[in-house]
Image (cartoon, rainbow, N blue to C red):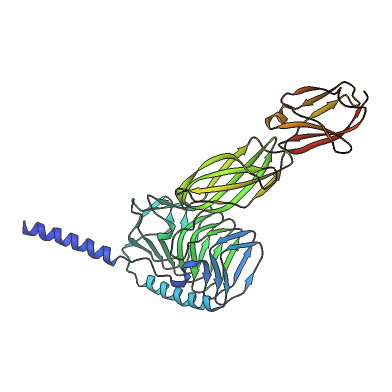
């Protein structure tokens, strides 16, 4: 019994010591708000790139265009000096961590790694196909992967977070260059000691920081973390409207979602008064790229305006920027006979009846004589009250003029 109790005590002690000594997430200091940073290297980019988070270099030039930074850009100033110092300290801290498990190269190919274990690779490595990081329902689980050499990810390779794993708790130490392949998806904070390259359409959910080396971007999406290490709130990376025949297709993409209950898609004929089109359930909390799609079956004629209202679980909400498109609707209608005597006939294509449609007739001085709703494909109007002369007509759809013309009364 004493031996059993001693063994149990030893196991508990080892577990306690392991949990206490497990390498905690490195203290990034002032670099924590950076999505991309190099202590010594140029910043270059091509294509259309969007960065959520700060971007900077302490020593190096900044070149390129078509770059959107939702954050701050720092070039060789007091902020980058401090960040450079803090990054060196964080890199040293990771170097001092003792390996728990050494794994072979390459990684990926449906490999599964669990949290709270320091994994090490002794040479340069390629990440192929899919790498799963499984937190096993422990949302505090930390993943630390140390690579004694460069890291390259294959074309279209992905890192998948499972069972509570988050990009905020994934850390990579790369003793060399970091190269993200075409269309690949990388997650976590990478501390590198060489150049950082994101090839065409590669995405980064986290941070890429290097003590020395150029940062090269090409048509990328980089979603960083805030200064506390938490994922950014709702990051809307795309919102588009495309005419599709008589309808309009709305698409939007989020890179992260925090506490997101639902989206409300709204449309407007004038850009100021909006009406609800659809409500779409949000993901709640997500650190992966999600795509949403809605078809507006009651789009306006001419220009339609759209916006997204995003509502949190606590009821707070915010609006996206307003976008617009010209309707792709095709419609036919006739007003006859013209000249007219006792009656006037209006024929409408059925598609015009989907929204509120009216006929308005007034004389050349602007005095209104007729205003009637058009609720059928064919409508006949008694015009005996109109004196002989010239009149103007408007056909309105949702208060928009979609056609005007001249009428002649020959009573």
Count of residue discs: 0
Res 346 → quadrant: top right
> What percent of the width, then of the height, locates residue 324?
68, 47
> What percent of the width, then of the height, locates residue 314?
45, 49
Q: Nearer the viewer, residue 29 or 48?
A: 29
> From what the image shows, is residue 155 above or below residue 407?
below
Res 278 → quadrant: top right
> What percent of the width, then of the height, locates residue 3?
8, 59
Q: Residue at x 11, y 61 (%)?
A: 6
> From what the image shows, is residue 290 above or below residue 145?
above
> What percent of the width, then of the height, locates residue 74?
57, 72
Quadrant of the image containing the C terminus: top right
Q: Nearer the viewer, residue 66 or 195?
A: 66
> From what the image shows, is residue 362 above or below residue 91?
above
Q: Residue at x 70, y 29 (%)?
A: 353
Quadrant of the image containing the N terminus: bottom left
């Amino acid at each position: 019994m004493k031996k059993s109790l001693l063994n149990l005590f030893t196991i508990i002690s080892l577990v306690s010591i392991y949990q206490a000594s497990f390498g905690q997430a490195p203290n990034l200091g002032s670099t924590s708000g950076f999505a991309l940073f190099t202590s010594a290297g140029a910043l270059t980019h091509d294509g259309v790139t969007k960065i959520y988070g700060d971007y900077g270099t302490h020593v190096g030039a900044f070149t390129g265009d078509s770059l959107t930074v939702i954050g701050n850009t720092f070039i060789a100033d007091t902020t980058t000096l401090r960040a450079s110092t803090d990054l060196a300290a964080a890199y040293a801290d990771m170097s001092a961590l003792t390996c728990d498990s050494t794994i072979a190269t390459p990684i990926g190919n449906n490999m599964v790694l669990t949290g709270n274990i320091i994994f090490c690779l002794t040479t340069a490595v390629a990440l192929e196909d899919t790498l799963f990081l499984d937190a096993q329902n422990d949302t505090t689980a930390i993943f630390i992967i140390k690579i004694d050499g460069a890291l390259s990810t294959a074309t279209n390779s992905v890192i998948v977070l499972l069972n509570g794993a988050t990009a905020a708790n994934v850390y990579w130490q790369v003793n060399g260059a970091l190269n993200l392949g075409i269309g690949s998806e990388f997650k976590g904070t990478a501390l590198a000691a060489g150049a950082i390259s994101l090839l065409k359409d590669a995405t980064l959910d986290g941070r890429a920081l290097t003590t020395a080396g150029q940062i090269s971007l090409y048509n990328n999406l980089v979603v960083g973390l805030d200064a506390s290490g938490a994922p950014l709130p709702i990051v809307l990376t795309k919102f588009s409207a495309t005419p599709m025949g008589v309808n309009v297709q709305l698409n939007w993409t989020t890179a992260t979602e925090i506490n997101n209950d639902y989206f409300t898609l709204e449309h407007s004929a004038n850009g100021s008064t909006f009406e609800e089109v659809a409500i779409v359930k949000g993901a709640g909390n997500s650190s992966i790229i999600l795509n949403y799609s809605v078809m507006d079956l009651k789009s306006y004629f001419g220009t339609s305006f759209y916006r997204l209202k995003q509502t949190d679980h606590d009821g707070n909400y915010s609006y996206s920027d307003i976008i617009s498109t010209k309707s792709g609707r095709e419609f036919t209608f006739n007003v006859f006979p013209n000249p007219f005597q006792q009656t006037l006939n209006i024929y409408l294509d059925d598609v015009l009846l989907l929204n509120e449609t009216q006929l308005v007739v007034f004389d050349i001085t602007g005095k209104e004589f007729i205003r009637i709703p058009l609720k059928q494909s064919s409508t006949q109007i008694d015009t005996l009250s109109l004196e002989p002369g010239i009149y103007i007509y408007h056909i309105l759809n949702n208060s928009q003029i979609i056609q005007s013309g001249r009428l002649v009364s020959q009573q």
